[in-house]
Amino acid sequence: MVLGRFAGPWLLLGLLLASLLVVQSGAWADELRVMDTGPVNNGVERGRTDEFFVRFNQPVDHIKSEFIIKRGDEVLEVLQPRFKTEPNVLFAERSPLPAGDYTLVWTVKALNGGQIAVGEITFKSEGRK
């Protein structure tokens, strides 16, 4: 019975400390960084340009992230990355792009829908050869 009377405050203190550790561990996590892309930034794609990927240093939310393909200021298509890829890779496909200058805009979102990061990859497609 003596343990029961003091267990409440200790349990509450333990839960409080555990919640602080969870919040702090998120704050100490590595910043999201791009490790690799396809197409490469400022690159020239020869042949079919129909696959797009961005590899990050940590897992990302595939379902709430997106790719936007632009030609100049015109949005050509919004792509939903595939869910069944590596946890740290956003990947999508579309029909091959004709020759021209393009920008791939990627947006990574948190599980709650809040934006984490946005980036752009400019590239040139020489079209099908």
Image: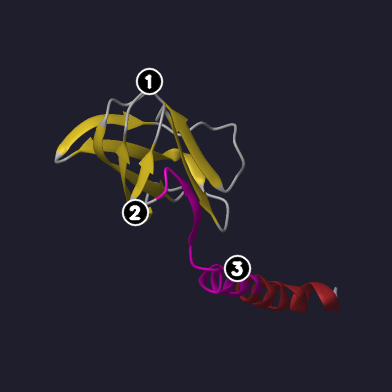
* Crowd band around label 3 with a 10 angstrom C-alpha radius: few (<14), some (14–19), many (20+): few
Which quadrant of the figure contains the C terminus?
top left
C-alpha separation, residue under disc 3 versus residue under disc 2: 28 Å
- Where residue 118 appears, as percent x and y from the top left, is 34, 53
Q: Is residue 5 magenta?
A: no
User: In the picture, which quadrant includes the N terminus?
Assistant: bottom right
**Left or right of 60 in this view: 47:** left
Q: Which residue is mark 3?
A: 22
Density class for disc 2 (Cα within 10 Å; few <14, some 14-19, many ≥20) is: few
Q: What is the three-letter code of the residue carrying label 3?
A: Val
Q: In the drawing, what numbered circle is on residue 119?
A: 2
Residue 71 occupies which quadrant of the picture? top left
Q: Amino acid at mark 1?
A: Ser
Position of residue 51 measured from the top left corner of the image (x, y, whole percent): 45, 31
In the rendering, at what x and y percent does residue 30 appear? Answer: 54, 68
- Label 1 to label 3, Cα distance in Å? 43 Å
Q: Is residue 10 left or right of residue 112?
A: right
Q: Residue 68: image x %, image y %?
A: 30, 37
Tell me the colour scheme of the image: secondary structure
The mark that comes first in sequence, 3 or 2, is 3
The residue shown at (42%, 43%) is 39
Q: Which residues are magenta?
A: 18-40
Which label lies toward us, 3 or 2?
2
Q: Nearer the viewer, residue 67 or 28?
A: 67
Find disc 1 in the rendering and name its residue.
Answer: 95
Q: Residue at x 31, y 31 (%)?
A: 78
- The reply to whether the magenta stretch includes residue 39 is yes
Which callout, 2 or 1, points to the residue nearer the camera?
1
What is the CA distance from the residue labelled 2 to the residue labelled 1? Answer: 22 Å
Residue farthest to the left? Answer: 73
Which secondary structure lies at badge 1?
Answer: loop
